[in-house]
Image (cartoon, rainbow, N blue to C red):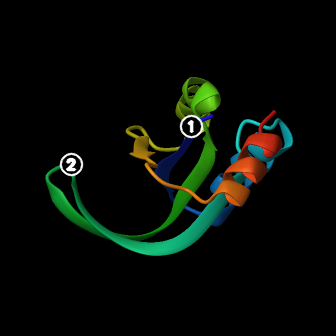
Amino acid sequence: MKPIAIISTYPNKKSISTISKLLVKDKIVACVNIIEISSIYSWNKKIENSNEYLAIFKTTQKNKKLLKQKIQETHPYDVPEIAEIDISSINDSYLKWLVNSTI
């Protein structure tokens, strides 16, 4: 089973915590890492600088499409980032845990 990670940014901890708990409970993801970050970006012809939360969703290839759909449906941003990270190498024990957590 191939592991994947999807990243997205959220405006506050509550919005990412709510969806993360649901995704773990429903076994769509094994884990979500949530990291507070500072983002500088262009939006509506202005340079913005805001605090956000980066979410790293860890799952398997079989759940990728459903995960992306759930992120899109629940995301508070008009234009959410939903970027897939290809994992070419992972230790066996972590992969086993990941697969067992998403069955």
Extreme-front residue of the structure: 92
Q: Which residue is mark 2?
A: 44
Q: Nearer the viewer, residue 89 or 54?
A: 89
* Distance CA(mark 2)–CA(mark 1): 38 Å
Instruction: Identify whether 96 is placed above or below 40.
Output: above
Q: Is residue 58 visible?
A: yes
Total count of labels: 2
In the picture, measured across the screen, residue 30 lies left or right of residue 15, that is right
Q: Nearer the viewer, residue 86 or 29?
A: 86
Rate crowding at label 1 as few (under 14), some (14 to 19) or many (20 or more) other CA atoms within 10 Å.
some
Q: Which mark is residue 69?
A: none
The residue drawn where x is 64% and y is 64% is: 13
Q: Which mark is residue 2?
A: 1
Q: Under tag 2, what secondary structure?
A: loop
The residue drawn where x is 74% and y is 41% is: 99
Which mark is nearer the camera, 2 or 1? 1
The residue drawn where x is 47% and y is 50% is: 8
